[in-house]
Image (tube, rainbow, N blue to C red):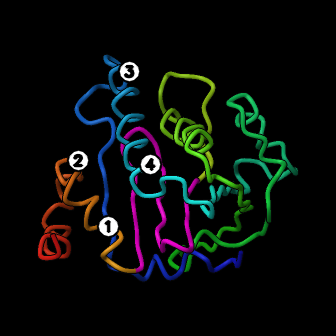
Amino acid sequence: MHADWLDPYNNSEFWLRFELGGDFSNLEQPIARLLQAMDRSRTISNFLFGEASDCLAIVAVSRAQGWKKYDWTRQYKEIGIDLSQAETEWIAAYNAFDENHLPMRWGAYSAASRSVRDVFLWANVTDEMPVSPSGGALTYLYSKRLGIVLELYDDRGLLVGALEPNGLVELYRQHADWLVENTRDDAEEIFAPLC
């Protein structure tokens, strides 16, 4: 992995932003919100990656979250992921658009199986919910072969990017109703003509 692995996706116009928790309140309806967010994130992840043998979970933690080697993995160990077993690690800024150029500790982990991806999804979906254990590190699912990246942020939603639109057309066609409202027009302009 190179520190600039994400740059081609950041420069791509082919992105979809999905809403996960929807209208369920995090405080008043946390179980309904959690279940819907997990169901949608799993559906999207499985649709995109299936059993992609090259799928990686790429996890980044900032200096503010703790740099001491593997201290920041405690939460993930509680969930069942040993982040001390990275296939590769590096230190780099979040991305080229990060004005502060804050260094992040990055690690790449095999996520070829659905069950492993589900644990990474859980870690981020539960990050700001009244649920434990949870994760909280910046996390992507990535397949170089497919040219697709999925950025998990929390129970609110996730982003999916591709280098070519064809990798996202069917996902758009099947789940356009899950797109964040203010992104639907842009997505329709790019993907609807390809359906």
**Residue 154 falls within the magenta-colored stretch:** yes
For disc 3, the marked residue is 30
Q: Answer whether labels 1 and 4 touch (C-beta < 8 Å).
A: no
Q: Residue at (73%, 60%) from the top-left corner?
A: 107
Mark before the other along the chain sequence, 1 or 3 = 3
State the residue position of label 2.
Answer: 178
CA distance separating discs 1 and 3: 30 Å
Q: CA distance from mark 3 to mark 4?
A: 24 Å
In primary-sequence order, the first of circles 4 and 2 is 4
Mark seen at residue 158: none
Q: Residue at x 70, y 79 (%)?
A: 2
Q: Secondary structure at mark 3?
A: helix
Name the quarter where the C terminus is drawn.
Answer: bottom left
Task: Out of 157 and 167, give the one closest to the viewer.
Answer: 167
The mark closer to the camera, 1 or 2, is 1
**144 lies left or right of 194:** right
- With 127 as the anchor, is 178 left or right in this view? left
Residue assigned mark 4: 46
Q: Which residues are magenta?
A: 139-163
The type of residue carrying mark 4 is Asn
Q: Which mark is residue 168?
A: 1
Give amino acid for label 2. Trp
78 lies above or below 127: above
Q: In the image, which is nearer the foreground, mark 3 or mark 2? A: 2
- Disc 4 residue crowd, few under 14, some 14–19, many 20+, Cα 10 Å: some
Give the amino acid at mark 1.
Leu
Element carrying mark 2: helix
